[in-house]
């Protein structure tokens, strides 16, 4: 599954600590999600800006990163290695002698004028595990009409939407959000949710009816999203991976203030400048997703799979390798297989503790 990081209320006097945390999280989130990295952020005036990379590692050598992050020093060290090894190094067809690479127009794009280092007051960061075509156009965020979306999950009925920015199912959420005018009226989230067949955890920068910048965070069933307070940042963060948050804090020596999972079928509206919650509304996710088959060629017909016969084993003797239900799960597409494996592992862990 894709991974999401959301940080509201970035403080100027904690910018150095926040940048270190974002960089550390980008590495951790990219370990299993290598199909692109992108972020959307807002400055103090509410202006939206974003960058996207097809190569996740290029985030660390982004043009806006100054020497306080150690990037320039790392480049110097890399160039020194090349000069010492000289002709022993293969160029792989490239005339660039540097050991590190830089993004090009084919694998990098930006929107707006701000930078994380100088301007960001809130940020949504995304690393991608591709469930459709790999390419820069499918790297999050997706932006239209001063609104940005990052998404973890799968939207099954994306063929019902007129995708203009990408071939990625996640763009369906942006289309539904804008069509339902959710930014203008938070109650319209129900219309958006009913239009989407799938599961999702999302962060959206938009504007409300008065033109104020807002950050909407919402998740449906079967998606993971948790909240943690980081003392050194003096704000909270939201993430699809609590283990990444804990590992980042451990690496940086930051204090992790505990984790709470967000409830499903709930949209929370946040003041992105200080992190205050300004509104909440519940909705009912469309249940059709779990009644239909989702496969790699994006067909959307009813499932033809028949449930496997459950082997009558005592729970403590069941392993995922002799559970016929698990064997059915692993036939699913990669994103759903990850979800199936996670839920199966949680079941086995619970049974082991019980027996």
Image (cartoon, rainbow, N blue to C red):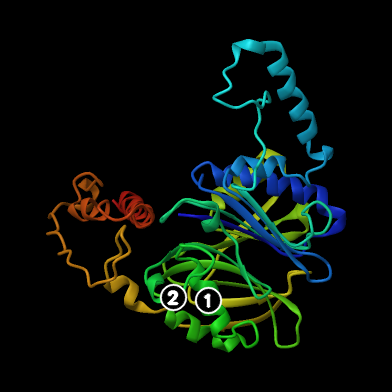
* CA distance separating discs 2 and 1: 8 Å
Indicate the position of residue 170 as horizontal and vertical percent values.
49, 66
213 left or right, relative to 58:
right
Disc nearer the start of the sequence (2/1): 2
- The residue positioned 38% from the left and 52% from the top of the image is 338
Give the mark count: 2
Asked if residue 173 is positioned above or below residue 125 in the image, the reply reads below
- The residue positioned 75% from the left and 83% from the top of the image is 211
Residue 199 versus residue 247: which sits nearer the camera?
199
Decide if residue 332 is in sight here: yes
User: Where, quadrant-wise, is the N terminus in this rendering?
Assistant: bottom left
Label 2, residues with CA under 10 Å away: few <14, some 14-19, many ≥20:
some
User: What SS does tag 2 mark?
Assistant: loop
Q: Which residue is mark 1?
A: 175
Q: Which residue is mark 2?
A: 161
170 left or right, relative to 298:
right
């Amino acid at each position: 599954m894709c991974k999401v990081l959301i940080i509201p209320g970035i403080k100027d006097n904690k910018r150095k600590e926040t940048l270190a945390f974002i960089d550390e999280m980008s590495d951790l989130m990219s370990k299993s999600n290598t199909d692109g990295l992108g972020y959307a952020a807002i400055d103090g005036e509410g202006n939206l800006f974003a960058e996207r990379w097809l190569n996740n590692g290029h985030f660390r050598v982004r043009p806006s990163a100054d020497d306080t992050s150690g990037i320039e020093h790392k480049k110097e060290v890399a160039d020194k290695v090349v000069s010492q090894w000289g002709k022993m190094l293969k160029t792989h067809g490239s005339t660039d002698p540097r050991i590190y690479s830089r993004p090009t127009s084919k694998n990098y794009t930006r929107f707006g004028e701000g930078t994380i280092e100088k301007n960001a007051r809130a940020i949504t960061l995304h690393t991608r595990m591709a469930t459709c075509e790999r390419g820069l156009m499918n790297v999050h965020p997706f932006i239209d009409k001063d609104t940005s979306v990052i998404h973890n999950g799968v939207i099954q009925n994306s063929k019902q939407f007129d995708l203009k920015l990408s071939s990625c199912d996640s763009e369906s959420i942006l289309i539904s959000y804008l069509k339902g005018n959710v930014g203008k009226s938070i109650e319209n989230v129900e219309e958006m949710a009913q239009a989407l067949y799938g599961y999702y955890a999302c962060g959206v920068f938009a504007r409300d009816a008065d033109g104020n910048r807002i950050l909407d965070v919402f998740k449906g069933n079967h998606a993971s999203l948790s909240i943690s307070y980081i003392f050194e940042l003096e704000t909270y963060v939201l993430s699809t991976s609590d283990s990444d948050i804990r590992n980042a804090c451990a690496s940086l020596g930051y204090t992790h203030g505990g984790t709470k999972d967000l409830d499903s079928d709930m949209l929370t509206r946040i003041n992105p400048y200080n992190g205050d919650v300004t509104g909440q509304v519940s909705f009912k996710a469309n249940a059709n997703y779990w009644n239909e088959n989702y496969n790699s060629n994006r067909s959307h017909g009813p499932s033809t799979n028949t449930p496997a016969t459950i082997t009558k084993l005592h729970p403590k003797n069941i392993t995922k390798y002799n559970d016929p239900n698990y064997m059915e799960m692993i036939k699913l597409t990669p994103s759903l297989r990850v979800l199936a494996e996670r839920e199966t592992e949680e079941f086995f862990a619970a049974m082991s503790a019980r027996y």
